[in-house]
């Protein structure tokens, strides 16, 4: 689940951010404001509408219910948009003169330049998805579809008095995040500085 979410975020959010940063189209400012506004809404407030929609389309207790809600993240779009704004337009224009389309210029020129920001986004997406409890426990309530955190919580309820077992499970669920962070620590710090809010 976490792997699919990271791969989806590496495709969807950068394209949206690039469009908002570099392309001109009707309704761009409105979409930009919507992205910023959704950053201010806690996910708890939209959880019931998400649940109702998932139920209507028959996605409850499916893999899609555990991945699709994580694919759009306004914070990542905003962060990447700030980076893409710093990319000189001349690079894109030079690529267009060489015969690339706008999408070609994005994938071949701009996307590789965003590597530190993309790694930062991947670390945040990894930690957020891996540790997510509210969405998976709401949209999937059968043991076969439990994610690690939800499964660990069910074990805690079953063997409440076995503290060593529960703590061992907590340590094991924390290790992948620590390993992922330490591998990409340098790029993470670089990505945070590159994607910072610029005046």
Image (tube, helix red, strand yellow):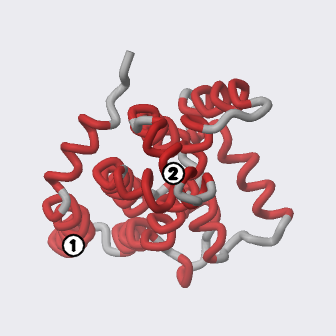
Specify whether 179 is left or right of 10.
Answer: left
The crowd level at tag 2 (other Cα within 10 Å; few <14, some 14-19, many 20+) is: many
The extreme front residue here reads: 97
Q: Is residue 54 left or right of residue 38?
A: right
Q: Residue at x 66, y 47 (%)?
A: 47
**Furthest residue in direction right, as rendered:** 56
140 left or right of 117 in image: right
Q: Residues within 10 Å of mark 1 (few under 14, many from 20)?
A: few
Name the residue carrying label 2: 14
Q: Report helix, strand or loop for mark 1.
A: helix
| 105 sits to left or right of 79 | right
* Residue 43 locus on image (x, y percent): 58, 41
At a point 58% along the width and 59% down the height, the residue shown is 99
Q: Residue furthest bottom?
A: 144
Residue topped by disc 1: 172
Residue 12 on image: x %, y %? 58, 57
- Residue 167 or residue 26, whichever sits in front: 26
Q: Nearer the viewer, mark 1 or mark 2?
A: 2
Quadrant in which the C terminus is drawn: top left
Q: Position of residue 193 (x, y in %)?
A: 24, 35
Mark drawn on residue 41: none
Q: Is residue 65 above or below residue 187?
A: below
What secondary structure is marked by label 2?
helix
């Amino acid at each position: 689940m976490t792997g699919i979410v990271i791969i989806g975020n590496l495709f969807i959010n950068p394209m949206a951010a690039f469009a908002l940063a570099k392309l001109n189209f009707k309704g761009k400012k409105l979409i930009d404001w919507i992205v910023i506004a959704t950053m201010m809404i806690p996910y708890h407030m939209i959880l019931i509408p998400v649940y109702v929609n998932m139920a209507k389309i028959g996605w409850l207790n499916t893999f899609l219910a555990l991945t699709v809600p994580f694919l759009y993240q306004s914070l990542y779009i905003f962060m990447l948009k700030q980076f893409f704004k710093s990319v000189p337009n001349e690079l894109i224009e030079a690529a267009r003169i060489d015969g690339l389309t706008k999408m070609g210029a994005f994938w071949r020129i701009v996307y590789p330049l965003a590597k530190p920001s993309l790694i930062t986004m991947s670390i945040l997406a990894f930690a957020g998805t891996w540790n997510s409890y509210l969405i998976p426990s709401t949209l999937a309530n059968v043991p076969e579809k439990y994610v690690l955190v939800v499964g660990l919580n069910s074990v805690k309820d079953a063997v409440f008095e076995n503290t060593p077992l529960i703590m061992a499970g907590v340590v094991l669920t924390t290790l992948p995040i620590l390993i992922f962070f330490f591998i990409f620590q340098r790029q993470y710090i670089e990505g945070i500085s590159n994607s910072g809010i610029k005046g």
